[in-house]
Image (cartoon, coloured by chain):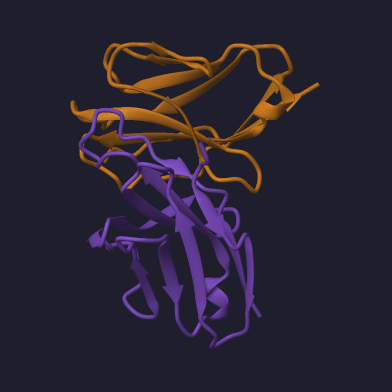
Amino acid sequence: NAGVMQNPRHLVRRRGQEARLRCSPMKGHSHVYWYRQLPEEGLKFMVYLQKENIIDESGMPKERFSAEFPKEGPSILRIQQVVRGDSAAYFCASSPKGPLNAKNIQYFGAGTRLSVL
Amino acid sequence: DAKTTQPPSMDCAEGRAANLPCNHSTISGNEYVYWYRQIHSQGPQYIIHGLKNNETNEMASLIITEDRKSSTLILPHATLRDTAVYYCIALNTGGFKTIFGAGTRLFVKA
């Protein structure tokens, strides 16, 4: 049973380019969460999605960042016109049920490390 | 969600028990205590969680004080592979913005 798959593992972009980060949740999981981790810091929540719906995007910058989780296919975190400050590790997590379930455990992928030159 | 405080780093000898403390003095009645760890360059990994009773699984034990203001994660026989940053998180039912603070950096030494 494959875990949460993120790709690419490493992504290099020049300033002004677009970055697309993909996340395939664990089989049977319909809830996806994205986090960002700056060097030497803890993870910061960005957005929570359930199939085709954004439930909470309060942690995501208002401009240049967007996320989707279509009915078919992986969840995508898209960063337009990247800047050097976007360089970070981006982690995706999934859960089988929503946060109201008793276990409320999130399963994390290995992350995508974005470097902006 | 309640804020948690943890020591920045700890050492443990291989084969000994590692006891990682966490203070959550403002925790509310419906907030669970969760522990995750992050091994270098990997995504966080769930370890254990509990509400008020002590919990044990194949990875660790969680001891929560009776007043729920603090807890201890116990790795009974630490190995070198347990070297990681350990995060203690208070999260209520329905909460999903898992707040990862600075955590405790555990070094297991041979």
Chain identifier, colour orange = B
Pick the front one: B89 or A71: A71
On screen, residue B59 above or below A56: above
- Residue A32: x and y in percent read 35, 52
Image quadrant where one finds the C terminus of chain A? bottom right
- Where residue A29 sits, quadrant-wise, is top left
On screen, residue B43 above or below B47: below
Give the residue displayed 32% in from the left and 64% down from the top: A70
**Left/right of residue A8 with respect to residue B30 in the rendered view:** right
Give the residue displayed 27% in from the left and 62% down from the top: A58
On screen, residue B4 above or below B99: above
**Left/right of residue A42 with respect to residue A51 in the rendered view:** right
Pick the front one: A63 or A9: A9
- Where residue A27 sits, quadrant-wise, is top left
**Left/right of residue A65 with respect to residue A104 in the rendered view:** right
The residue positioned farthest toward the right in the image shown:
B110
Q: Colour of chain A?
A: purple
Give the residue displayed 73% in from the left and 26% down from the top: B80
- Residue B106: x and y in percent read 63, 31
- Residue A92: x and y in percent read 45, 53
**Is there any visible trace of residue B99 in the rendered image?**
no
